[in-house]
Image (cartoon, rainbow, N blue to C red):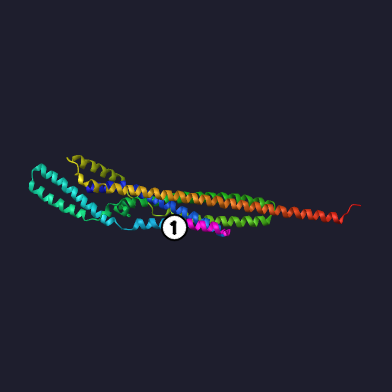
Amino acid sequence: ISMYREMYQEKQNKRPIDEYLNEQEQLQALLLQAEGMKEKALRHNDREAYLKASTVADRLQKEIQDQDLAESSPAGTAMYREAETVVRQIKEANQLRLMAEESGNTAVVERLDSLQVRLTAVLESFPPEIYNPSGFVNYFDDFPVGKYVAEKQHQYDLMLEQYDAINSELGRIDSLVSVTDNRIATAKSERNFAKVSQLEMKRRNLVQLRKRYDELFVAVNESDVAPNPYPEFDRWGDLGAFGIISVYFDQKRAMQGELTQVSSVLDEVNQSIDQRKQVIEDKIKKIEAEIRLMTMRARMEERARLRAERERAFKESYFDTRESEASEDENNPQQ
């Protein structure tokens, strides 16, 4: 049954791995926005906005780093796997004991009782922390096939997004080239050669930009990313589920009550992952709200600056005009 269980759990635990990869992608996108805010604040010499953007960027960078370390760290998982192996051996010994009892083989029952005592002693030797879900920081290492399939499919999805984005940008550049060509023709007909020169330079820049996008487009198309890295993954996962149902259907007795607490460890791990996911989602929402607020403030400050410049220019123009009129009145007194 362990083989069936492994196949089934590989498929079932692919979903949290997909969610982990999506969280990483969202954090990277937010970090890119924060870095852009830093550059904008630096260009406008806005020290306050720069410090706020730097704080957000540092928090995002730390969150990404913490996730990377948690995903790659082996702490706690080795001991947990050992405990899980002992639990599985106890369950298997218990099933064999039930079969020996039914067949009346007392010698085998005695040997299995002795084995269960020794295995229980081994299980009790593990520290209590092994049953604390917070101790497991590398849950995905237990499902390498599911992780491989999830990562490859995620890479393929990113490749499709890049493909669509590049294709859209190429279309936009072609449209700009066409508009520029029309403007060049109009400028030539008007014999506005200065404008023709300016437009031709703009067209050359667009052509160069399109060449770079063409190269990127070719690179994306040539990337070695398969849409379905393991075609039989879902089928084998379903087969594993069917195998578990079939094996348990043939069992005549339920597991003993003393194994209930140990068997619930997997459920506690799943609950811990769901809690961790909620915490990360809350952090992402908070950071997104801060970025939106900073963007709105930057726009309001920019509008206020432009409004102040317009008012200053108007006042300067108005007083210059008034002084000029006064000077003319003094030079031309009434007769």
- Residue 5 visible in rendering: yes
Residue 88 vs residue 65: left or right?
Answer: left
- Residue 305, above or below 249: below
Q: Dot 1, how many residues are within 10 Å of its Cα: few (below 14), some (14-19), or many (20+)? A: some
Local secondary structure at mark 1: helix
In the displayed structure image, the side of residue 10 where residue 33 appears, left or right: right
Q: Three-letter amino acid code at disc 1? A: Gln
Q: Position of residue 74 (x, y in %)?
A: 31, 58
> How many discs mark residues in the rendered view?
1
Prevailing secondary structure of the magenta residues: helix
Nearer to us in this view, 198 or 86: 86
Magenta region, residue range: 43-56
Rendered residue at 66%/53% (across/down): 308
Is residue 163 inside the magenta stretch? no
Residue 232 in sight here: no
Find disc 1 in the rendering and name its residue.
Answer: 61
The stretch drawn in magenta includes residue 53: yes
| Residue at 64 percent of width and 53 percent of height | 306
Q: Residue furthest right?
A: 335
| Rendering quarter of residue 129 | bottom left
Relative placement, left or right, of 208 versus 285 is right
Rendered location of residue 259, percent (x, y): 21, 47
Q: Quadrant of residue 317?
A: bottom right
- The x and y percentages for residue 203 are 59, 55
On screen, residue 296 versus residue 9, left or right, reads right
Residue 122: x %, y % from top left: 19, 55
